């Protein structure tokens, strides 16, 4: 299925509590299908998708350059007993889809824990993350309000999306936003090699959550 | 549900995923290799070469002269070379880089090197990641001989219950750091969740954990030494064939008669004695002034599976008589890799013909990336009586720019035979072609002047 005919291999990883819909979210994204059955993920898995990325300059205008991007989307088990296995994979991912269930307050509360997991295990102290509230279609069972989630996302300085794997709403947008962040990070890292060592140094931490801070810790 | 059974299934599932990941990574590695190869080619083309004038007033990339006022060039911030306006590529809002630095930057993106570098800042990589293959081979081989816990043949690995399932993984050479880490965590994980392990396995796992590095490298080395072995095996039987008359070919270099000395050419003496000016052969001209005529038919292909450069010697035509008086010619073709003296190979000798047909495939075992900067030298010799050899012409084929993927370049080509390529200095310089940039600083203190 895969060949080497692409420009970038970008590895993203979905994480979050068990049952928030990571697998169905990725299934919707890669195959545009919905599987309502709950099948717990055993340890880890990944799906792939080829997308075309259009580069844009810092002003947001497209430069017209397009690249073929091969996405490797890692799916992790949310269950506690797989934790040591799944966190080992964090360090190989370039960006993260941190998901919670809009119909479960507990899964939202655990976002903080997942953030610290990321901080400890991801490739750098402040990796690119998007916060995703899934199951937006189940409006009547909703337990987490948009405002609440948005505030948390702002605190961490990361984008927030309310998605539905069932309807497909915002699914693509969430992934592509993360891809965009990773692509921008890439340029920052390469173009300013040792320029701002003071910024990295572990001083800026995720938990400190300095909103809208310049993100690259390189 | 039986917990043990579930875990076996789980293992199977996870390993299946890892195998898929491995496949993807193999493709990725291949892609990166290709990319870096192209970059290297670009670099070579754009490099300031000592043959050309190394001056401020030429563009470092295209070597075009730069004007004093108009198109005077500007310094690339990455490489500090002076670059003409045509060899710049815009980067970011207002900045630019020279073509080579730009390509380098692109490769850093596309190969994911940026990510590895970032990751290395947080999780320092063990040094062996940047080790050369040869060094690692040696080291792992060394380790292998000292570890009695791990038997030297792969099958006993089946003892490792969970590792044994990773048949593919085990044979995978580029066991990345992350995979190792994963395996370790996986091991410990399994240890944690399955309490019904028997002691032996627990021990094995512990060994696995404590000897983490060595254990994995052993596995690595297993596959690599296997490869090594097989390549040795391949070399073993083929060497005698190729150098059936290795004796004569050895004699060529230090042959007795003056005739041979000259016919063998200055490159030998040059290569053997360096550029010593006392080289005899360089002073002698071609002894038997046989005019070089004819052509040689060659086809080159690179077999990535066996890491072999396969040179098919097709035929020669319109050769001159090696023995002009008796109108006789027993031609054979010899191949060398330049620079260096390695990879001397030769075809059989065809009797009494000036249009010999060989169709022999000569294999040169070399890693693909080591072909950079190499040239294939194919010489045609008349094999006379008493092992006298007469030079009938040669062909030099540069291998760097060779498009092995290209079907056209894999076909047979006729190359006109030439006189020996000799530089005025006497061949030695030509043979060891390379670059050396020297800065000489005169310190008056040390000179005592």
Image (tube, rainbow, N blue to C red):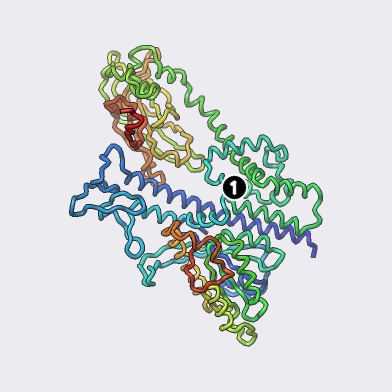
Q: Is residue B380 left or right of residue A51?
A: left
From what the image shows, is residue B126 above or below residue A150?
A: above
The answer to whether A149 is drawn above or below residue A55 in the figure is below
The residue shown at (35%, 48%) is B42
Q: Position of residue B333 (x, y in %)?
A: 38, 26
Closer to us: B128 or B256: B128
Looking at the rendered image, the quarter that the N terminus of chain B falls into is bottom right
* Chain identifier of the residue bearing label 1 in the image: B
Could you tell me which quadrant the C terminus of chain B lies in? Answer: top left
Along the line of sight, which residue is nearer the eye, A185 or B279?
A: A185
Q: Is residue B318 visible?
A: no
Place of residue B285 in the rendered image (x, y in percent of width and height, measured from the top left)? 27, 18
Where in the figure is residue A173, as x and y percent of width and height? 49, 74
- Indicate left or right for A115 with B283 as reference: right
Left or right relative to B126: residue B339: left
Q: Residue at x 57, y 65 (%)?
A: A13
Residue named by callout 1: B172
């Amino acid at each position: 299925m895969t060949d080497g005919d692409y420009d970038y291999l970008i590895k993203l990883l979905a994480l979050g509590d068990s049952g928030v819909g990571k697998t169905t979210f990725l299934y919707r994204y890669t195959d545009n299908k919905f599987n309502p059955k709950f099948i717990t993920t055993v340890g880890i898995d990944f799906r792939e998708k080829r997308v075309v990325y259009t580069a844009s300059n810092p002003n947001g205008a497209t430069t017209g350059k397009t690249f073929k991007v091969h996405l490797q989307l890692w799916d992790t088990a949310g269950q506690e007993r797989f934790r040591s296995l799944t966190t080992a994979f964090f360090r190989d991912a370039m960006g993260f889809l941190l998901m919670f269930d809009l119909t479960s307050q507990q899964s939202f509360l655990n976002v903080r824990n997942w953030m610290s997991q990321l901080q400890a295990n991801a490739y750098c102290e402040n990796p690119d993350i998007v916060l995703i509230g899934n199951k937006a279609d189940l409006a009547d069972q909703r337990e987490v309000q948009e405002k609440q989630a948005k505030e948390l996302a702002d605190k961490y300085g990361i984008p927030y999306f309310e998605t539905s794997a069932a309807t497909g709403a915002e699914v693509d947008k969430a992934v592509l936003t993360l891809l965009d962040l990773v692509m921008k990070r890439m340029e920052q890292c390469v173009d300013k090699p040792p320029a701002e060592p003071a910024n990295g140094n572990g001083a800026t931490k995720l938990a400190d959550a300095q909103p809208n801070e310049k993100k690259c810790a390189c | 549900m039986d917990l043990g059974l579930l875990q076996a299934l789980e293992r199977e599932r996870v390993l299946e995923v890892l195998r898929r990941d491995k496949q993807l990574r193999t493709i990725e590695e291949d892609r990166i290799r290709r990319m870096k190869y192209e970059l290297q080619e670009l670099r070579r083309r754009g490099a300031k070469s000592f043959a050309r004038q190394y001056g401020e007033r030429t563009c470092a990339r295209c070597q075009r002269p730069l004007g004093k006022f108009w198109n005077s060039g500007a310094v690339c911030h990455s490489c500090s070379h002076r670059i003409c306006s045509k060899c710049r590529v815009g980067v970011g809002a207002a900045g630019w880089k020279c073509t080579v630095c730009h390509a380098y930057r692109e490769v850093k993106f596309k190969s994911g090197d940026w990510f590895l570098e970032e990751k290395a800042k947080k999780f320092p990589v063990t040094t062996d990641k940047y080790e050369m293959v040869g060094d690692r081979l040696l080291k792992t081989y060394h380790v292998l001989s000292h570890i009695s816990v791990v038997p030297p043949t792969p099958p006993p690995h089946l003892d490792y219950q969970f590792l044994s399932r990773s048949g593919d993984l085990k044979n995978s050479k580029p066991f990345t750091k992350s995979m190792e880490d994963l395996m370790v965590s996986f091991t410990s994980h399994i240890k944690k969740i399955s309490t019904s392990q028997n002691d032996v396995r627990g021990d094995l796992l512990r060994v696995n954990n404590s000897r983490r590095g060595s254990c994995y490298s052993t596995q690595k080395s297993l596959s690599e030494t296997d490869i090594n072995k097989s390549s040795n095996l391949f070399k073993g039987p083929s060497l005698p064939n190729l150098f059936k008359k290795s004796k004569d070919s050895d004699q060529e270099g230090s042959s007795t008669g003056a005739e041979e000395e000259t016919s063998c050419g200055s490159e030998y003496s040059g290569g053997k004695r360096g550029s010593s000016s006392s080289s005899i052969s360089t002073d002698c001209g071609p002894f038997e002034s046989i005019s070089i005529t004819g052509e040689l038919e060659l086809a080159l292909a690179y077999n990535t599976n066996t890491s072999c450069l396969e040179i098919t010697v097709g035929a020669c035509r319109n050769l001159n008589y090696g023995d002009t008086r008796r109108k006789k010619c027993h031609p054979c073709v010899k191949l060398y890799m330049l620079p260096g003296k390695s990879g001397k190979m030769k075809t059989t000798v065809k009797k009494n013909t000036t249009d010999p047909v060989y169709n022999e495939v000569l294999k040169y075992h070399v890693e693909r990336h080591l072909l950079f900067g190499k040239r294939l030298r194919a010489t045609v010799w008349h094999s006379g009586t008493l092992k006298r050899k007469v030079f009938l012409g040669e062909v030099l084929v540069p291998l760097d720019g060779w498009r092995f993927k290209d079907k056209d370049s894999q076909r047979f080509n006729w190359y006109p035979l030439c006189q020996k390529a000799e530089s005025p200095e006497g061949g030695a310089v030509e043979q060891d072609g390379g670059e050396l940039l020297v800065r000489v600083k005169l310190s008056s203190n040390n000179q005592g002047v």
